[in-house]
Structure formats: C-alpha cells, structure tokens
Image: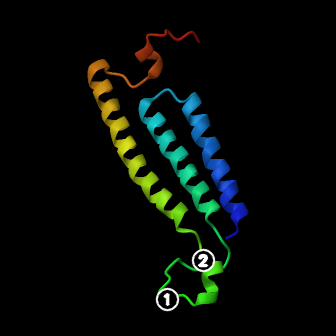
Amino acid sequence: MSAIVLYVTFILLLTIGIIALLFKRNLIKIVLAFNILDSGINLFFIALGYRENAMAPIFTLAPLDSVITMVLPTPQALILTNIVIGFATTALMLGVSVLTYRNNNTLDTRKLRGVEEYD
C-alpha cells in the first residue's frame, strides 16, 4: 500500500467528519462525526510514519545495516495515545448526550438551543 492511498483516505475521512459536524443536528451523529475525524487524524499519523519495505524498530533482531530502513516508533506511540484519548472523549460525549436526552427529551441541537425551525 502506498502512502498516496493513505493520504487520500485521510483527506476523505477528514472531509466526511467535518461535513458531518457542520450539517448534522443529532448529538449522537455529532459524536460519530468526531470519531470519524479522530480516525482520519490517526490515519494521518500512520501515513507520516509509513516507509516502504521498512522493518519494525526491534533492535535485538535487526542487523546493524538495517537501522536506516526502520520505521519511527514515535507516530505509533502518538496513535496509541490518541486512541485512548479518543475513547475517553467519546465516552464522555455519549454520557453528556444521555444526560441531555434525559433532561430535555431531545437530541436535536436546534431544539436544545431554542431556535425555531423555519422551513
């Protein structure tokens, strides 16, 4: 898989997430849009750390001349951290959405703001 495919998919996920954030009114759909956006950011970090025909950075098994062809472990660590933070943020947003529904009996952001809809 080339890095171009990763970058195109990253741009596609980022675009879908931003469009969904701008145009969806349901709080659950907004949470899903944040997850799609988060997945796009994770894919961007994967694309940054991608090297064709590279080895995992395990120095005990690698020959000395293959250090040049190893991938950097920094993007992998950032992605793992971002996955944990994304999970916690999603759980918090879903919890707030449930409390909002219990208090207001709606998940529509226009009704929550008190804006009447003029169609």
> Which residue type does callout 2 highlight?
Met
- Please give the residue where the numbered disc 2 appears in the rendered image: 70
Residue at position x 59%, y 72% from top?
71
The colouring scheme, among rainbow, by chain, secondary structure or one colour, is rainbow
> Which residue type does callout 1 highlight?
Leu
Q: Does 85 sit left or right of 98 as displayed?
A: right
* Residue 54 at x, y percent in the picture: 63, 78
* Residue 32 at x, y percent in the picture: 47, 41
Q: Residues within 10 Å of mark 1 (few under 14, many from 20)?
A: few
The single residue placed furthest to the right in the displayed view is 4
How far is disc 2 from disc 1 in space, using C-alphas?
12 Å
Residue at position x 43%, y 23% from top?
108
- Please give the residue where the numbered disc 1 appears in the rendered image: 61
Give the quadrant of the C terminus: top right
87 vs 22: above or below: below
* Residue 6 at x, y percent in the picture: 66, 60
Residue at position x 70%, y 55% from top?
8
Between 78 and 42, the one lying in front of the other is 78
